[in-house]
Image (cartoon, rainbow, N blue to C red):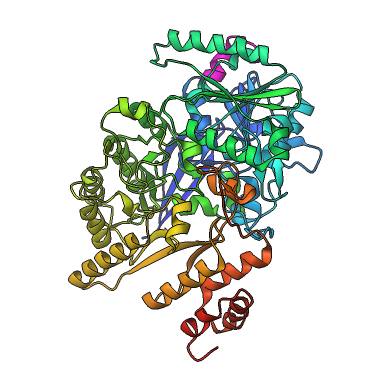
Amino acid sequence: MKCEYLSKLDSAGCVHTIKRWGSALVWANMGHFLPITLDEVKRLGWSEVDVVLVTGDAYVDHPSFGTAVIGRTLEAAGYRVAVIPQPNWRDDLRDFRKFGAPRLFFGVTSGAMDSMVNHYTAARRLRSDDAYTPGGQAGFRPDRATYVYSRILKQLYPDTPIIIAGIEASMRRLAHYDYWDDRLFPSILVDTPADLLNYGMGERTTLKIARMLDEGRPIEDLYALPQVAYCVQNIQSIQSIQSIQSIQIIRNNQNIQNFQTIELHSFEECRKSKRAEAENYRIIEQESNKVESATLVQRHGDRYVVVNPPEPPMTEQEMDATFDLPYLRLPHPKYKKRGPIPAFEMIRWSVNTHRGCFGGCSFCTISAHQGKQIASRSEASILREVEAITDDPDFHGVLTDLGGPSANMWRMKGKNPGLCRKCSRYSCSMPSLCKNLDSDHRPMTGLLRKVASYPKVKHLYVGSGIRCDLFAEGNDGWAYFRQVVLHHTSGRLKVAPEHTSDHVLALMRKPSFDLFRETKRRFDDICREAGLRYQLIPYFISSHPGCRLEDMAQLALDMKRMGYRLEQIQDFTPTPMTLATEMYYTGIDPTTMEPVYVATTPADKADQRRLFFFYKSDQQRDIAASLRRNGLSHFIPRLFPGKK
């Protein structure tokens, strides 16, 4: 007999599930969503709202969605939180007005994605869909959503603090290159009326902000908090705030010594000199890689943008508390008639084990946003979430992922924390595994087996990317790989070598392609021994800084020899605050300050991308023509036998 699974709000604002077995109805109280309408606020009996969160995403009450995490964190501390998801910015602004001014602050985010990445392809073409909107419909958030929302709110409520956060604000906290306008932008704090920027994963800092504002403290007092950025008129006020920070550090018994402030090249200098911008990025990245980093200051005209050092990584207990909050693990019922939310459907049956990444890839923003240090959940917390998922009436036995930004970094950390505090390496795995890194894979292999043993779990897959450069003798990495191949793969295991050229891979901060060859050899051996016809699917990027057409032609030739017809490919898209973006904009590798070749024109990028499809007959004529134009005719007969 089929079970129907529905949900509805009652008069008190609580959500119930309805299980319909034939003619029988079974009701179960689930708690309530954070209110998104004035009616829901009234049903909860609130006379006012303490915090209003404004987001470019639809509201999904799930720990994979930042708005839900921040909202539930504040709620658990006793604050009344409402959400304005995907407000209409084109009409009379009624969405922004519906709750009035919150008692404490507005929290503003573009959503789980940068709004420009959400809207545009690498070729700057408008996308036709949006994974964070019901029905996948595009057009429900503006370009540069954080900018638009915060300007509207300050216009409507000039006396209410605006705190911006999320990936869009976080990666734009200092001067940055904007690919879509093809120019250097100032800090988002200069272009918006925001009072404060909370960067990175912001639960702890958001709670401190709420408590200080609740105490009646002025915004200026919040400038002393870690993991915030702000804008002031003169250098003297920064020096005054630095003394406040030093006092606070001592009061909190944090073992931080030699407190530093580093002044970067000004925005105006960087606009005139790409070398100055590259030098800035080298410092920004070095400091973001440290456990104990400096305060960064950058002058913009007659103002100064200040970025305070981040919070220490969350402890296991704090991570558990975040994931154990009473999420309903569903989109708000308001969206039911508009269709499913693709981003939610993708992660609904997955479990996040950790945050952060120490891989240091040039093109990735994870370490700059989530941190280089890994913050892991306890096994008990992970298993509690597995139980919650398997108890869902809609669950049909398949867990789609157990991992994080990288699947196999759970619980990895420095053996000697003291050495980590002194370290500024961009990666713990490149150019070789750090000797201080505890890269033991046995806890993860054990966790996979425990989750797979649940009676209601028919299949457990690992959908997150696996870092094969973490496999080494003595850490059971290849045993973990064998476990994944044999028991946690749907038949197609994806890995990301990114390129075949070693000099391009060096600029990507990725291991030699020889590692992929070794991975494929082991994969094929495992499948042959087990009688499996599985596929290892490589992921590649074209037009990355340092990559020439010749490198792409060699990649195509390597794939032809290995029998691959590529599917998982991407044209490099510059996004703020990555090393690769700085190389793209400046033509300089900030690590060495040496010049780097960059394919920047649409034609050059298209020529590179086309080589991914060397096996398609309708592409071969254009590929051959571009190879001839660039003096690479010797590749043509090797790629296309019989052609000259």
Residue 15 seen:
no
| Front residue of this view, candidates 570 and 320 | 570
* Extreme residue in the right direction: 92
Q: Position of residue 323 (x, y in %)?
A: 40, 34
| Front residue of this view, candidates 592 and 446 | 592
Q: Is residue 485 above or below residue 445?
A: below
Q: Is residue 158 above or below residue 125?
A: above
Does the magenta-highlighted stretch encompass residue 124? no
Q: Residue at x 67, y 37 (%)?
A: 146
Does the magenta-highlighted stretch encompass residue 214? yes
| Front residue of this view, candidates 229 and 458 | 229
Q: Position of residue 285 (x, y in %)?
A: 51, 36
Image quarter (top left, top right, bottom left or bottom right) of the C terminus: bottom right
* Extreme residue in the front direction: 594
Q: Is 301 left or right of 539, judged from the image as shown?
A: right
Q: Which residues are magenta?
A: 208-219
Q: Main secondary structure of the magenta part?
A: helix
Task: Place residue 379 in its image quadrant.
Answer: top left
